[in-house]
Amino acid sequence: MSALLTVESLDVRHGLLQAVRQVSFEVAEGETLALVGANGAGKSTLLRAIAGAHRPAAGRIGFAGQDITRRPAHRRARAGIALVPEGRRLFPELTVEENLQVANASRRSGSWDVDTVLEAFPLLQPLRRKRAVSLSGGEQQATAIGRALMTNPRLLLLDEVSLGLAPVVVEGVYRSLANLIEAGTTILLVEQDLARAMGAADRVLCMLEGRVVLEGLRGQLTREQVTEAYFGLPRQEATA
Ligand code: ATP
C-alpha cells in the first residue's frame, strides 16, 4: 500500500504553546488509523493542521504525492481531504438531506451521493426530511460524517465521533463507520476510547503532550502498552 498522507516532523503552535511536536507518520491508501491520547495531547490540533485550518510552524505535509504544507484549506478539500470537526456543526434549520446537499458545492466525482450515504447510515433513512435541530446527538454525528462523505474525500479526518454520545448510539455510529472502512475509505480517526479505537482501526498512533509516543498495527499492540503510552506511565523494567 502506498502512502496517501505523509506527515513529517510537524510542529504546530498555539502562540507560545507547542501543541504538536516533531510528529511524523503516514496513512496508507485504504487504511484506518486511530489517533489516541488524553485531553490536550494535540490530536485535534494535528487534524486541523492536516486539513489546513491551522498553519504548522515547521515540518511537511504530503498528500497523494504532493507537498500541501502551504496550501489553503479549500484547496486541500478539493484535493480530497475532508474534516469532520468535534461538535458536528450542522445547519440546525435545514433537514438531514439539505445538510448533506450543502456539500454539493465542494463535491468531487465519486460514488457518494445522498442515496449511498443513506445506505451507509441506515439510521438516517427515516430522518431524511427532519430538521437537524430535532435530531439526537448520534443522528447529528452520522449526518456530519455523511456530509463529509458527500464530497467524495480520499481522506476522511474524524475528530472524536463518540464524544458526548450514549454507548448504544456510539455503537450505531461505529457500525456505519465499518461500512465506510469496508468500502475502502481512508480514515484518520481521533478517539478517546481506547477499546473503540483498537477495535475499528488497522493501526494505532498514541500521542502524549504533542509527541507520538507509540505506533503499531492493532494486532501488535497490547491494551497495556497503549494505556501506558496514553497516560505517560513509565515502562515496567523487565525483571531478570
Ligand atoms: P481534546 O481531546 O481535549 O480535544 P486534543 O488531544 O485534541 O485534546 P488539542 O485540542 O489539540 O488536544 O490541544 C492541544 C493543546 O493545545 C492543549 O494544551 C490545548 O489547551 C491547546 N490549544 C488547543 N486549541 C487552542 C487554541 N485555539 N488556542 C490556544 N491553545 C489551544
Image (cartoon, rainbow, N blue to C red):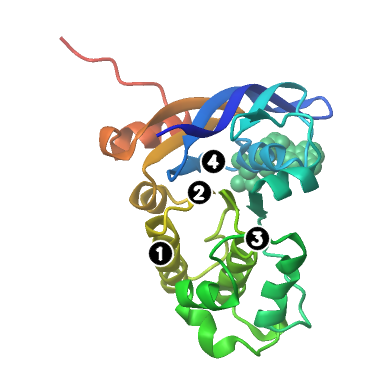
Residue at image coords 30%, 20%: 236
Q: Nearer the viewer, residue 50 or 160?
A: 50
Return the disc, 2 or 4, that comes first in the chain's sequence.
Answer: 4
User: Percent position (x, y) of residue 33?
Assistant: 45, 42
Foreground label between 3 and 2: 3
Contact? badges 2 and 4 (CB < 8 Å): no
10 Å crowding of disc 3: few (<14), some (14-19), many (20+):
many
Judge whether residue 192 can be spotted in this image.
Answer: no
Q: Quadrant of residue 56?
A: top right
Q: Secondary structure at mark 1?
A: helix
For residue 179, which numbered disc appears in the image? 1
Judge left or right: residue 163 versus residue 216.
Answer: right
Contact? badges 3 and 2 (CB < 8 Å): no
Foreground label between 4 and 1: 1
Foreground label between 3 and 4: 3
Q: Which residue is mark 4?
A: 38
> Does any atom of ligand 1 lie closer than 8 Å to the CB of label 4?
yes
10 Å crowding of disc 1: few (<14), some (14-19), many (20+):
some
- Dot 1 amino acid type: Asn
Q: Secondary structure at mark 3?
A: loop
Q: Which residue is mark 3?
A: 151
Q: Which residue is mark 2?
A: 187
Distance, label 4 to label 1, CA atoms, is 27 Å
- Dot 2 amino acid type: Ile
Q: Secondary structure at mark 2?
A: strand
